[in-house]
Amino acid sequence: MAARLLLMRGSEILCTRWNVKSDMQISEPAEYAILGLLERQPMHGYEMFQQFQGGTLGQIVHLEMSQMYAFLKKLERMTYIEAELEAQGVRPPRKIFHLTEQGRATFHAWLTTPVERPREIRLLFLIKLYFAQALIPAQLPHLIDLEVAACQRFLAHLEARHIPDSHSHDTAFLDHIVLRSRIHQTRALLDWLYELQAEFAGMR
């Protein structure tokens, strides 16, 4: 009886751990950036942190040291990355992180999937460009084409919505302002994407 209860208890613990893992999702742009850095090469934590402190990536993503180690722990629990201990002589060993096959597949699926909304384009698409240029430069023109098409679809969706009369009640007036703002933001981003598309046209 005791053995049966112990077995049942162990099964409950395993199921709980599996559910925690299966419920976790990548939710922050910096988490994809970490996967991208590790796709380029294995790194230790401080080496990764330095990538966010200067240069182009640091201009796109702001990251504190405590946040980065929390993201590393999360990605490790999701089995997207693994760590190995590296000896440092008399100093304590350090963790060297690298991608798993699951992490690599997840990153490349994200890298080649366009985003639509202005905030996503301003942040996520810039991260995608940063890593695509380093990892898959020949695919850059195609990825930009996909992004242009996605942005065009989102703009058409916004423009198809009924724009409330700006002279009606307060709520409708605010709805009018917000919708017009989103339309103008999306048009501006689409113009920028057209310029980008023209710049990379010679790479085809």
Image (spheres, helix red, strand yellow):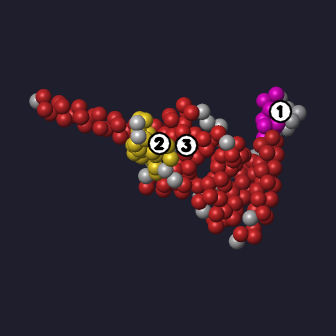
Which class describes the residues within 10 Å of circle 1: few (<14), some (14-19), or many (20+)? some
- The main secondary structure of the magenta stretch is helix
Q: Quadrant of the C terminus?
A: bottom right
Q: Quadrant of the N terminus?
A: top left
SS of the residue under disc 2 = helix
**Callouts 1 and 3 close, C-beta under 8 Å:** no
Under mark 3, the amino acid is Glu
**Residue on which disc 3 sits:** 47
Q: CA distance from mark 3 to mark 2?
A: 17 Å
- The local secondary structure at tag 1 comes to helix
Instruction: Name the residue tied to disc 1.
Output: 173
Residue 44 lies, in percent from the top left, at 49, 43
The answer to whether residue 190 is above or below residue 89 is below
Q: Residue at x 24, y 34 (%)?
A: 10
Tell me the magenta residue range: 170-179
Residue highlighted by disc 2:
75
For the question of whether residue 56 can be seen, the reply is: yes
Local crowd size for mark 3, using a 10 Å CA cut-off: few (<14), some (14–19), many (≥20): few
132, above or below 203, in the image: above
Please report whichever mark, 1 or 2, sits nearer to the chain's N-terminal start: 2
From what the image shows, is residue 198 above or below residue 100?
below
- Residue that sits furthest to the front in the current view: 90
